Image (tube, rainbow, N blue to C red):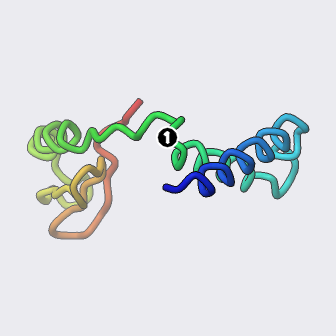
Amino acid sequence: MSVTDNDHLHRQLIRLGDMIGDGLADEPGGTWIKREYKQCMRALGIAPPRRNRSALIDERMQQRVAEVACSACAGELKQTRAGSTRAKCAACGALFQLLKLK
């Protein structure tokens, strides 16, 4: 990123922070302010990066899928996608939330 991009992002971060401080983000239609503030923080490298816990989730989901059967048809469950805490029945297509993350 060039210096001008960083300057622009810093100015935008200050402007959005002032808007949050004035309470504009809490008014109806102001949710975009907090969202843009987070994006600026990530772009500048100030915010901590997201943690990648998909390997841990996948390992735990393999155990849960083996333990639990479909409550509707007693069919086999399969994780919907990598890193997901949901499982789908192979027979009837019912969705289940198998893990709760903190």
Residue 8 screen position, x and y as percent: 68, 54
What residue would you read off at disc 1?
45
- Identify which residue is drawn at 82% across, 58% down: 29
* Residue sticking out furthest to the right: 22
Residue type highlighted by circle 1: Gly
For label 1, the crowd category at 10 Å Cα-Cα, with few meaning under 14, some 14 to 19 and many 20 or more, is: few
* Residue sticking out furthest to the top: 102
Position of the C terminus by quadrant: top left
Residue 28 screen position, x and y as percent: 86, 54
Question: Relative to the observer, which residue lies in front, 38 or 56?
Answer: 38
Residue 18 screen position, x and y as percent: 84, 39
Q: Is residue 80 above or below residue 83?
A: below
Question: Going by the image, does 24 lie left or right of 85?
Answer: right
Question: Relative to the observer, which residue lies in front, 21 or 98?
Answer: 21
Residue 72 screen position, x and y as percent: 26, 58
Question: Going by the image, does 95 lie left or right of 6?
Answer: left
Question: Relative to the observer, which residue lies in front, 101 or 26?
Answer: 26
* Residue sticking out furthest to the bottom: 92
Q: Element type at marker 1?
A: loop
